[in-house]
Image (spheres, helix red, strand yellow):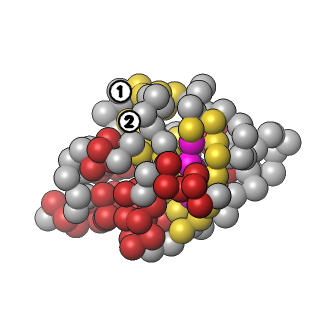
Amino acid sequence: MKNIIIGVLATFLLFGCSSKSGENKNVEPKLVVGKSLADLELKDQFEKPHTLNAETDKVIFAFDKEAAHTCNDFFNTQKQNYLQEHHAQFIADVSAAPSIIRSLFILPGLKDFKHIVLLLDDKEIATPYRKNINTTKIVVVTILDKKITAVKTITTTQELKKVVEQTAKDENALN
């Protein structure tokens, strides 16, 4: 029964994440090489606020249903502190879901995950992060001192594992 409820909640979460409304606003894109993410402050699924710490070198974004499923399914099979050990943070965009759906279904479902999920839950805040990005894929942002050094998209759990476990130093040497 619990799995059915989680499945329904995830479906509600991820159907809302694929909305394209609000993306055509005249806003400056945030996920651009050279820009800073120092001002990024989001709440997690437990309503606890988070900012990027100095050790964070990767931020993984999921803007739609498939990307979020891929990330959550993978992270849920890892140790609870897997993301922290690899200096990564995971952000899911739930801004397109109606607030009642977020409150009744999405947030309770996300609380079952053992990993931290930071939430883009406001369309106005989410729009600059979505701008000029392929939102159907997992977006991996590499940062150094909270400044973006690379933005790439991936689709598979194998790619996700590789980028999470790759150190920023290794990645910057490749660029």
Give the residue drawn at x 67%, y 64%: 134
Residue behind mark 2: 44
In the picture, the quarter occupied by the C terminus is bottom right
Q: Which residues are magenta?
A: 139-143
In the picture, the quarter occupied by the N terminus is bottom left
98 vs 17: above or below:
above
Q: Of helix, strand and loop, which one carries label 1?
A: loop
Q: Assign the magenta stretch its main secondary structure.
A: strand
Give the residue drawn at x 58%, y 52%: 172
Quarter location, residue 47:
top left
- State the CA–CA distance, disc 2 to disc 1: 5 Å
So how many labels did they put on this image? 2
Q: Residues within 10 Å of mark 1 (few under 14, many from 20)?
A: few
Give the residue drawn at x 35%, y 47%: 86
Quarter location, residue 50:
top left
Q: Amino acid at mark 2?
A: Asp
x then y, percent, for residue 40: 56, 30
Find the residue positioned furthest to the left.
1
38 vs 3: above or below:
above
x then y, percent, for residue 33: 71, 46
In magenta stretch: residue 35 = no
Give 169 or 101, whichever is nearer the viewer: 169
Instruction: Examine the rendering and report whether any part of residue 94 can be seen.
Output: no
Residue behind mark 1: 48
Q: Residues within 10 Å of mark 2 (few under 14, many from 20)?
A: many
Q: Of helix, strand and loop, which one carries label 2?
A: strand
Give 169 or 159, whichever is nearer the viewer: 169
x then y, percent, for residue 142: 56, 48
Instruction: Examine the rendering and report whether any part of residue 76 can be seen.
Output: yes
Q: Amino acid at mark 1?
A: Lys
* Label 2 close to label 1 by CB (< 8 Å): yes
